[in-house]
Amino acid sequence: MTKFTPFDVADYLDNEVTISTYLTEALKDPDPDAFLAAVKAVARARGMTQLALDSGLGRESLYKALSPGAKPRYETVMKVVHALGVNLYAEARE
């Protein structure tokens, strides 16, 4: 019998290019939970404890802000994104 391990995208988020591409694609999804799930995956890949320290947020606050259905404040999202070392920007549609 073949055993499979569950897929975890965080296992593949191991460099800045992959992370920024992943987050950019998540931003294209109309469901805001898709972006929060992507940020949470990157946070897990980088280490939630370190991200909490780098962002100035408590670990519990971080988990709560990135949970499905959460509606984190813009300020919170920007703290997390900056702590992850990525920039968000807008570009004209093609």
Image (spheres, rainbow, N blue to C red):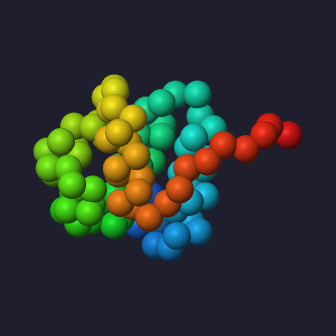
Evaluate whether residue 7 shows in this view: no
Q: Position of residue 36 (x, y in %)?
A: 41, 40
How many marks on residues? 0
Horizontal side of 50 relative to 24 (left or right) equals left
The answer to which image quadrant residue 74 occupies is top left
Q: Position of residue 10 (x, y in %)?
A: 40, 61
Query: Image point 40% across, 46% down: which residue?
Result: 78
Tell me: residue 87, above or below residue 32. Answer: below
Relative depth, front residue between 4 and 39: 39
Tell me: residue 67, above or below residue 18. Answer: above
Relative depth, front residue between 83 and 26: 83
Q: Position of residue 88 (x, y in %)?
A: 55, 50
Query: Image point 61% across, 58% down: which residue?
Result: 21
Horizontal side of 53 relative to 5 (left or right) equals left
Query: Image point 21% across, 55% down: which residue?
Result: 56
Horizontal side of 49 relative to 20 (left or right) equals left
Residue closest to the far bottom:
15
Horizontal side of 36 relative to 60 (left or right) equals right
Q: Position of residue 94 (x, y in %)?
A: 85, 40
Residue closest to the far front:
75
Tell me: residue 77, above or below residue 11. Answer: above
Evaluate whether residue 24 shows in this view: yes
Tell me: residue 9, above or below residue 31. Answer: below
Quadrant of the rendering where the N terminus is positioned = bottom left
Query: Image point 63% across, 38% down: which residue?
Result: 28
